[in-house]
Amino acid sequence: LPELPEVEIVRRGLERVTQGLCVRGAEVLLPRAVAWPAAPVTFIKGITGCMLTGWRRRGKYLFADLTNPVGAPGGCLAVHLRMTGQLLWLRREVPVSGHCRVRFFFDEDRELRFTDQRTFGRVWWVSALEDVAQVVSGVRDLGPEPLSDEFSVAYLHQRLAASRRPVKTALLDQRWVAGIGNIYADEALFLAGIRPETPCDRIGRVRARRLRDAVRAVLTASIEAGGTTFSDYRDVYGGSGRYSEVAWVYGRGEAPCRRCRAPVRRIKLGGRSAHYCARCQR
Ligand SMILES: [Zn+2]
């Protein structure tokens, strides 16, 4: 699934290709891909004629700010890629795949296609009169951005001290910290030297600092590498990321640890796989 680095790479690509452009129209091929407004025709009417002034990211959500044809706020377009969603910048003559759910048309025969094999991805148009946190499900409950000052050692330590859950499960909780999924939870725990099943309240302040720093380090490294490519993640040009080539433990079950050569272990934790090195993580 795309996590913070992959969504950030998509955001940067979208900003590069669509900033300042006007949406000339749209076509909804799968009505339930539009989460809001209820009628796809209202969605299309809402965004048509608007200029995209920029793209923001919050956790794994993408938001395009819109200005309507008379220069007034036009609300925003929100996208969540979920498991297999992609936003691809294409020429209109490129054949439309069977997984295409929404098409956004621009000048010069360009279009942005939202394709999504598993169909869990969603788009929203939030009018200027509506509140994003009310309309876009899940946004209101998001914890701090991991690369922001809000995600401080004091904040993380306080959260950890009040929970007995396995630390890996806590890192995946979007109310604790936004944007982290299975890949970067495993990677950050390796870098911090903490086993994924460790109860949160056994992690003291010193290790909380190591974990906070490790989360930031792996996310930053992955953004620099263009993200991690798994089955469906692609940037807006259809390209893939390189982080999986340098990952410490994620997806490396039984391969030798890059630090100590002991075999990386793969276990089940809360229904998800977790990868760790029994020698490097305590
Ligand atoms: Zn090791």
Image (tube, rainbow, N blue to C red):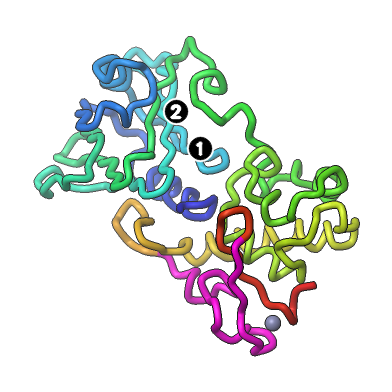
Is residue 227 visible in the rendered structure shown here? yes
Q: Say which residue appears at 46% left-offset and 62% top-offset.
A: 226
Tell me the element at label 2.
strand
Q: Main secondary structure of the magenta part?
A: loop
> In the picture provided, is 252 more to the left or to the right than 265?
left
Q: Which residues are magenta?
A: 241-268
**Residue under the image location 54 percent in, 84 percent down:** 255
Q: Is residue 8 left or right of residue 169?
A: left
In the picture as drawn, the residue positioned furthest to the right comes out as: 205
Q: Residue 209 appears at what percent x and percent y?
A: 83, 58
Identify the disc placed on residue 65: 2
What's the residue type where badge 1 is placed? Arg
Dot 2 or dot 1: first in sequence order is 1
- Label 1 secondary element: strand
Which residue lies under the disc numbered 1? 56
Query: Where residue 109 appears, x then y in whole percent?
Result: 14, 40
Compared to residue 73, the image places residue 83 above or below, namely: below
Q: Is residue 49 visible?
A: no
Q: In this orientation, which residue lies closer to the viewer: 200 or 55?
A: 200
Query: Tag 2: residue type?
Result: Asp
